[in-house]
Amino acid sequence: MTVLFVDIVGSTRLVEQLDPEDVRALQRAYFGTVASVLRRWRGVVEKYVGDAVMALFDASGSDGLDAYRAVRAGLDIQAALARRRPAGIRLSVRVGVATGEVLLDLAGVRDGGHGAASGAVITTAARLQEHAPPGGVVVCPATRDAVAGLVEQRPLATLTLAGKTLPLDVWRVTGPAGSRPARHRVPLVGRRRELASAADEVTRALRERRPRWISLVGPPGSGRSRLLHEVTRAVSSVDGVPVRRRVTACPPYPCGELAPLADLVRPRPDATGVDGPGGVLAAFLAAPDDDTAAQRAVVACREALLGLAAEAPVVVAVDDLDRAAPALRRFLHQLHVSAGERGLPLAVVTTCGSGSADPLPAPARRIPLEPLGPLDTGRLLRHLLDRAGRPAALAARLVTLVGGNPAVAAAYAGAEPSGVPAAARRLVDARLDRLDGTHRAVLLAAAASGGPAGAAAVEAMLGWPAGRAEPVLRALAAARLLHPVAAGRWAVDALVARVAALRLSRAVRADFARRLRAAKDTAAGRVPGAATGVPSRGAGEREVCPLGAGRSRRSGGGARPAPVPPDRTDACDTVPGQPGRAGALPAEPGRAGALPAEPGRAGQPVRAGPAAAATRIVPGVTAWPGQRSSPSSVVAAWPDPSPVVTAGRERRIGPPWRVGRNRRRTEPGGHALGLAA
């Protein structure tokens, strides 16, 4: 998780000079400005400490760009306060941003409660803020690596922070990164077929003067940006006529919808003889982030590119089109259609993610980027290890962990095989957080099985009826998170299994192991638990999935369940979807991935542990194995892969969960407990 701290410089001296009414007006304007910027960048305010604001990024689900959003929020806070001048006073603030593992209470985050997050990274962010220059945004090494290439950074002096054993290198962020050509120092490996196909499509389009759209499709880290670069280089001329290349990239969360167009129409050295831009086009190039100027210049931009194509073949290359705003997609579609109507030599080459469903104008060609094979992965690893000055023999150990993903290979080339590099973990975390609760629960159970798992083993670990896991396993295999190893058995990708282990608490892993042993004992005709001395459950006691069996729904990149008030005993009042509650998600019947409530459970008392009071159960409700509940305790199933457990005032319930970067638990004594696997 990434943590941001912002505080006012010299607030004590400032407040002493103001009347209480002026202080109140200043605080409201300041906190309101900061909170609005944080909401825009999907940050969550965790607490206010005097004049300081602490915010969390990745509290509800990772998109792989959490550190980038935090840094951009810090820059925007500085700019917003400089423009607004709350209460007529020019405020100077410091911002510190740090990335690391935390212990997160999901219910506390939803309520905006203090102490929702705990961990050393919070202290680091606070200390960085104290050492930041007025008006500056400083970041730790982990954040710096996560935003490399996306923002402009310059190193500051190495600092010794209070409470830190070792000195810490820090960087100051000065603004978003400008467009610059990518630098590739490693030979292209394993993409000859895709390169030849794309280059052939481009050449045909230019030679026949029939515009064509080529889309390079692959998951993050598959090397699609590198392939786009190689395609534009491969087609340098057609029938002796030089090809003009216009290349741009869509940054994450761009400031202007059409800002990437500036790179396509800005005069370049290879545009000799072409008239320079004028009028609205010049105004757009001077302020590409201004949407008003961009909308006025759309026609001028299109005509400029069509004019280039009338003189010589043109290749328009756009990287990361799935990040683009609809306005930019419409522009490219109209450019392609107009070039076809005029019979101009123009080709559009784009890259996008595997899940993109954006319709392409005909004629079009999608070229998928499959994972590299073991031989190509080994070759790439040896190149990367050689550049890093590490033994090439490590390639044999890393091949299975890389999984054919070039970005993961680059991450492991500079890390130890025993760990999970931060860059690789960000990629996997984002993939797991895009899954709904059903698929994520099955994947984590399969990963915890310790080897190839079948549907029966997964169902035993989750407490599901027979036949429920099989279609989910097949869907995960189609998404390349699992791979079949035998009839009816699947293995989890090695890197995914490592990250999954970091997201599960020790208690859940132990419970999974117990369930798996019990299932094997039953299949062998033994009494469950007899071999290990673990007592089996009594009659009437129900095995319940430790990840929860409630309905799951993902919204806005990862909606999480609202907490249950601890002093309420009416379970019906705590069902998700109550009117007027912020973030409450109704359980939608028939929704893909939704799990129906098991018949016969509504209103039945469930024994939740020795000498436990009967707990009222509503449809879809789950209980934790071996927990003790009080008469006012309610255990409810939520639209999330894990239940939220709300304890009454008498005692806390639930195991003490341990957490990594994307593992959640609550501290002892908390009212609400939750695990988001």
Image: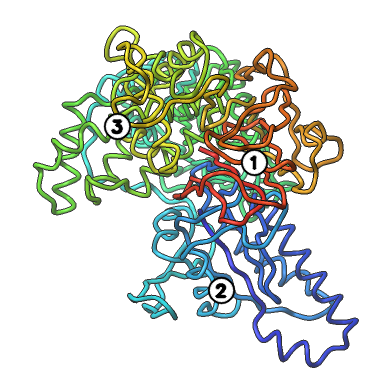
Q: Is residue 282 left or right of residue 448?
A: right
Query: Where 38 falls versus 213 (above or below)?
Result: below
Residue denoted by label 3: 494
Q: Nearer the viewer, residue 133 or 141?
A: 141
Residue type marked 2: Gly
- Mark 3 or mark 1: name the one nearer the start of the chain: 3
Label of residue 136 in the image: 2
* Residue at mark 3 to residue at mark 2: CA–CA distance: 41 Å
* Residue at (52% x, 27% y) in the render: 545
* Residue at (66% x, 31% y) in the render: 637
* Residue at (84% x, 89% y) in the render: 18
Among the 4 quarters of the image, the one containing residue 382? top left
- Mark 3 or mark 2: name the one nearer the start of the chain: 2
Q: Nearer the viewer, residue 319 or 91?
A: 91
Q: Is residue 580 left or right of residue 289?
A: right
Residue denoted by label 1: 629
* Residue at (38% x, 30% y) in the render: 514
- Mark 2 or mark 1: name the one nearer the start of the chain: 2
**Residue 30 on image: x %, y %:** 76, 70
